[in-house]
């Protein structure tokens, strides 16, 4: 499928999530979407009075349909009764709100949008409401039962296994590689822009992988928004199924290669990364004391310092558990009890996807903001000058804690442009709301509109203005913890939150130390597109000019 075709068919994922004045609960409403209203008008007999095979069929079909309908009505009675009490847009008889969702929903479905942080807390902080909405199943051929979509005991066991591999102690050991890769990225940027030399790519698989992921997201978005593509039985006969098969093959061949290499090294007794870091980029040569501080001005790695999840375990977790993700997976698979080979592949696919597209969107929006708001960029660079002076040394962990203004700019970017703009859960139990006298009924799909929450004027005055001071300690102090949730929150929060924040700080500080960013496009001209991950439809158009220091070097 050509990019053009994909672009044409790509539409904003439920624009209501991003737009204003739509279905909300708390200060808002619920929506019953009724899509299927088939009527059965069977022929009840034959002129001769002899029952034909088709009349027998209809004879049996009618009571079956009536029974099914009665059962369906009764099983939804509780949900519908509770839903009717929740304010929502006016419904048509039979059709409900189906016309507003034409082409986007597969059948009668109760969607409830939450934007009040107090209600959001009820869902996200719970250990019970952890099931993902049914729409996540479209990821299954790609991510299997990886952490993002699995549930129940499997999710719990694997989350317990994986979360410690993203503990701060493990992440600190990645700093040299973050630096080396950020440096490489800045060199490649220079080569490909100023020097006009194309990158010598011996191994295309990384690039092919990223392109395949991008196209897979297009297909998933299509299935989210086009009702007829939802059932597998129909999807599988469309051209998209064949394209998906090819893309998944590209994606899985990289993950298979990664696991194979790791296993081979493991058998040779080699643990950890085999990537080499040049001596001048090794932070041990620069780090005086390794700080264990994690909180910068009330913020802790992308969320309020007052929020804790399983990534915030402070005690020393012991040598054995202090292993990086894939090392631990391979080791845990040796006895085959905790995780098997197929499950490792699913987790690698999940981490690879969740880990690259989201941070790519976050860093691209950040650089767009720097390009547009030059005086803010100057302040970030001034802070970096104070930390690094004229030195070209790599950023240490302690340095990342000093990047307070840069961190505020990053938070503000994640507020205005959360890479994951909505998340959705399937409710299996009734939940009484805090914001009003309403009960969310079991069976409903709960949509948490991160993008909208982050732009509520009662929480962020002047919400459409890029203002890093929104994250000054005095402003965050009285804000509800769940009013800023770019990484979700609670037991099912993003397992890569700390990884992402550390990597982004090192990458973005390295880029800004060596380049000035400019942009000809203003924020009001952004064409936001939310197909799984939030992006700019027109692409991230920014310019990078080498700073004086780089020219000198
Ligand atoms: C700026 C970067 C990132 C953002 C904004 C982000 C955001 C999120 C959000 C909102 C969720 C919850 C999704 C849901 O409930 O549907 C999530 C889950 C997840 N993220 Fe991230 N993420 C980022 C980076 C990463 C990285 C770097 C990794 C891995 C290295 C990662 C791995 C995961 C995994 C495995 C889950 C599923 C966790 C579970 O369900 O237990 N993410 N992320």
Image (tube, rainbow, N blue to C red):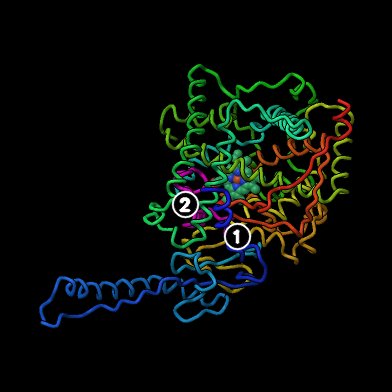
Q: Of marks 2 and 1, which one's residue comes earlier in the chain? A: 1
Residue at left offset 62%, top offset 63%: 17
Label 1 SS: loop
Taking the image as shown, residue 186 lies to the left or right of residue 533, namely: right
Image height of 268 relative to 461, above or below: above
Q: Nearer the viewer, mark 2 or mark 1?
A: 1
Q: Residue 12: image x %, image y %?
A: 60, 60
Q: Residue 3: image x %, image y %?
A: 57, 48
Residue at left offset 46%, top offset 77%: 95
Residue at left offset 45%, top offset 30%: 333
Identify the residue position indicated by label 1 in the image.
12
**Magenta segment range?**
122-150
Query: For the residues marked 2 and 1, what is the alpha-carbon distance in whole angstroms?
Result: 17 Å
- Packing grade of label 2 (10 A; few <14, some 14-19, many >=20) is some
Taking the image as shown, residue 178 lies to the left or right of residue 510, namely: left
Q: Nearer the viewer, residue 491 or 97?
A: 97
Residue 257 visible in rendering: yes
Residue 148 on the magenta segment = yes
- Packing grade of label 1 (10 A; few <14, some 14-19, many >=20) is some
Residue 397 visible in rendering: no
Residue 450 on the magenta segment = no
Residue at left offset 44%, top offset 27%: 334
Identify the residue position indicated by label 2 in the image.
138
Q: Residue 279: image x %, image y %?
A: 74, 18
Label 2 SS: helix
State the image quarter where residue 273 is shown.
top right
Q: Quadrant of the C terminus?
A: top right
Q: Nearer the viewer, residue 448 or 192?
A: 192
Image height of 165 relative to 117, above or below: above
Q: Nearer the viewer, residue 169 or 459?
A: 459
């Amino acid at each position: 499928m050509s990019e053009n075709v994909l672009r044409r068919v790509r539409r904003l994922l439920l624009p209501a999530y991003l737009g204003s004045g739509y279905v909300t609960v708390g200060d808002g409403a619920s929506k019953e979407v009724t899509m299927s209203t088939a009527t059965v008008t069977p022929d009840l007999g034959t002129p001769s009075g002899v029952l034909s095979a088709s009349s027998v069929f209809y004879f049996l079909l009618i009571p079956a349909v009536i029974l099914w309908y009665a059962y369906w009505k009764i099983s939804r009675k509780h949900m519908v009764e509770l839903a009717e009490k929740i304010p929502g847009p006016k419904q048509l008889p039979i059709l409900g709100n189906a016309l507003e969702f034409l082409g986007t929903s597969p059948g009668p479905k109760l969607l409830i949008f939450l934007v009040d942080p107090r209600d959001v807390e009820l869902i996200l902080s719970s250990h019970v409401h952890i099931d993902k909405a049914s729409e996540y199943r479209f990821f299954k051929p790609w991510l299997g039962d990886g952490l993002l979509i699995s549930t129940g005991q499997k999710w719990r066991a694997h989350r317990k296994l994986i979360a410690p591999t993203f503990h701060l102690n493990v992440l600190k050991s990645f700093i040299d590689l973050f630096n080396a890769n950020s440096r490489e990225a800045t060199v490649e940027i220079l080569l490909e822009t100023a020097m006009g030399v194309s990158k010598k790519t011996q191994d295309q698989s990384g690039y092919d992988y990223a392109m395949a992921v991008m196209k897979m997201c297009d297909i998933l978005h299509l299935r989210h928004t086009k009702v007829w593509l939802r059932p597998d039985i129909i999807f599988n006969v469309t051209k998209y199924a064949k394209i998906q098969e090819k893309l998944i093959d590209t994606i899985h061949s990289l993950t298979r290669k990664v696991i194979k290499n790791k296993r081979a090294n493991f058998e040779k007794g080699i643990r950890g990364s085999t990537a080499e870091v040049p001596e001048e980029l090794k932070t041990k040569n620069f780090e005086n004391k390794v700080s264990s501080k994690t909180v910068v001005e009330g913020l802790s790695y992308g969320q309020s310092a007052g929020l804790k999840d399983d990534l915030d375990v402070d005690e020393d977790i012991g040598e054995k558990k202090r292993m990086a993700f894939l090392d631990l997976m391979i080791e845990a698979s040796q006895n085959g009890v905790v995780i098997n080979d197929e499950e490792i592949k699913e987790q690698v696919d999940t981490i690879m996807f969740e880990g690259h597209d989201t941070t790519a969107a976050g860093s691209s929006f950040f650089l767009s903001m720097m390009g547009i708001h030059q005086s803010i960029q100057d302040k970030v660079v001034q802070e970096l000058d104070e930390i690094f002076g004229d030195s070209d040394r790599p950023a240490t962990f302690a340095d990342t804690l000093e990047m307070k203004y840069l961190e505020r700019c990053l938070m503000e970017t994640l507020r205005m442009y959360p890479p994951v703009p909505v998340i959705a859960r399937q409710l299996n139990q009734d939940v009484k709301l805090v914001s009003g006298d309403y009960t969310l009924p079991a069976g409903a799909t709960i949509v948490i509109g991160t993008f909208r929450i982050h732009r509520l004027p009662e929480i962020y005055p002047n919400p459409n203005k890029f203002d890093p001071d929104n994250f000054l300690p005095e402003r965050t102090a009285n804000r509800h913890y769940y009013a800023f949730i770019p990484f979700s929150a609670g037991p099912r929060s993003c397992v890569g939150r700390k990884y992402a924040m550390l990597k982004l700080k090192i990458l973005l500080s390295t880029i800004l130390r060596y380049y000035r960013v400019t942009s000809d496009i203003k924020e009001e001209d952004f064409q936001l597109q939310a197909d799984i991950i939030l992006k700019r439809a027109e692409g991230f158009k920014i310019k990078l000019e080498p700073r004086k220091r780089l020219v000198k070097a």
